Image (tube, coloured by chain):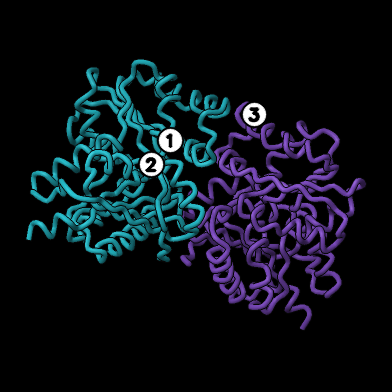
Chain colours: A cyan, B purple
Amino acid sequence: MYTLIMNKPIGIFDSGLGGLTILRGLEKAMPSENFIYFGDTAHVPYGSKSPQTVTNYSLQIAKFLEKQNIKFLVVACNTASALALDTLVKNIKVPVFGVIEAGCCAAVHKTKNKKIAVIGTHGTVKSSAYKKLLNVIDKNIKVAQIACPLFVPVIEEGWHKTKAAEIIARAYLDTVKKSGADTLILGCTHYPIMKPLIKKIMGSVHLIDSAEEIAKQVKKVLQSKNILKKTGASNTVFYVSDDAESFEQKAAQILGRKTGKVNLKKL
Amino acid sequence: MYTLIMNKPIGIFDSGLGGLTILRGLEKAMPSENFIYFGDTAHVPYGSKSPQTVTNYSLQIAKFLEKQNIKFLVVACNTASALALDTLVKNIKVPVFGVIEAGCCAAVHKTKNKKIAVIGTHGTVKSSAYKKLLNVIDKNIKVAQIACPLFVPVIEEGWHKTKAAEIIARAYLDTVKKSGADTLILGCTHYPIMKPLIKKIMGSVHLIDSAEEIAKQVKKVLQSKNILKKTGASNTVFYVSDDAESFEQKAAQILGRKTGKVNLKKL
């Protein structure tokens, strides 16, 4: 029975392309695992949408992945983790893990001055999901939250190494600097792609990259449940809700490899 | 009978906020008209979505507006005009008018060297809708099409007067300059908001602002059909498909006045 569960894939979803940084981290940490990735390209971006709408889309995707017989669900989208996680946990039978928990645990572990900053989309910041969870873990932690909504389009256009990106990043990160935080959570799956630039601007501040953290933690959970697939060939299947062709092109850039056929699944 | 039709509102829709520049133009040109504006904020942006998806959303909105008893439908969104206009004309009983026709007619009238450039979203450029229509009007016109996908997020964040916006604009518009066009169509409803910056960079090139052009042309059509409402108080009703509160705030900035209550209508 365990062998059977082991071979089932891990489901992972995001509003679009950003979650591929998380998938990349998971594949690297668990090279024999099978994955199903769902990118909700018909509804991207989630960051500017209402909690009800984001929850509705997330639940539809989670139900679809559950039907594909997954053993574990990773919510790779920060906005969906912030707004829909409770609903998913209540309505989905397999264990659900969101990027926010992963980022918060790692940040609390790192900070020395108990000042943590979080950057993300409007939706993530407005939800205060990081702040709430950080203060559940330690109520003395001061949290600064800064929305950086231009980072995602800049990254999706491949402009993250330009002078324009640097000006935009300096404007946003100036607020982070003023907060005195010694630890900065990259609270959006796209942001690790801008990590070199953020590192250059933030200097000695610790950067928490959700892709790295979630991979470590998911692996630990699967090991503890004895359902980690440790050997044999792996496979990743891709689904999107719109424009599979454009996803295939852009995904290859983020993943550093081809995706193979991307399946279209309208929601 | 004519009086009755006259009093019916003009329906106008866009993927989100951008169409408000068109609404502003229409209200200015026809101050006694009634309008119903629909912003598809649950699905914004259309620019990166597939033709099927954009057509599907557009048709749902047009059917909804038809039920509100409109006398005329203005497709204020360039992407929807580019991808869905034929389907709308076939399926909607009232006359349908898209921003693209308006922009093309004006540009052909203005150009002297028969070289016209168009800037827009990925979706608009990929559809070649401007190029096709310009060449239907005059097959000798040379058309350069340049996608400027970062303009919309920059404008929606209110960053259009920053140094970053200027660097981004110069990078895109450099390609327009190289085309030798003497006329540039702002092929996205957001772009008129960046007009001062675009004007500064483009110098003597004629800028075609769809909001101004479509207002002139819709007025002409209504006059010719004898259904223009010329006197009396006017009224504009707003619908969005998600997050009415955030729309209300941002809309006031673009319109330069309050919208009043914004109604939520899920699609």
Task: Choose mark 1 or mark 3, whichever is in front.
Answer: 3
Task: State the mark number for residue A126.
Answer: 2
Please state which of residues B95 and B167 is positioned toward the viewer in this rendering. Answer: B167
Q: What kind of element bears circle 3?
A: helix
Please state which of residues B176 and B16 is positioned toward the viewer in this rendering. Answer: B176
> Label 1 crowding class (10 Å Cα cut-off): few <14, some 14-19, many 20+?
some
Pointers 2 and 1 within a single chain: yes
Based on the displayed image, in which of its 4 quarters is residue B103 positioned? Answer: bottom right
Q: What kind of element bears circle 1?
A: strand
Task: Choose mark 2 or mark 1, whichever is in front.
Answer: 1
- At horizontal 56% and vertical 56% (from top left) the residue drawn is B46
Based on the displayed image, in which of its 4 quarters is residue A207 positioned? Answer: top left
Q: Spatial distance from mark 3 to mark 2, Cα to Cα?
A: 29 Å
Task: Report the chain holding disc 2.
Answer: A
Q: To which residue does mark 3 refer? A: B167
Q: Spatial distance from mark 2 to mark 1, Cα to Cα?
A: 9 Å
Q: What kind of element bears circle 2?
A: helix
* Image coordinates for residue A24, horizontal then vertical, percent: 33, 41
Left-right relation of A231 to A155? left
Q: Is residue B31 visible?
A: no
Figure quadrant of the N terminus of chain B: bottom right
Q: Is residue A82 visible?
A: yes
Left-right relation of A229 to B14? left
Please state which of residues B217 and A13 is positioned toward the viewer in this rendering. Answer: A13
Q: To which residue does mark 1 refer? A: A147
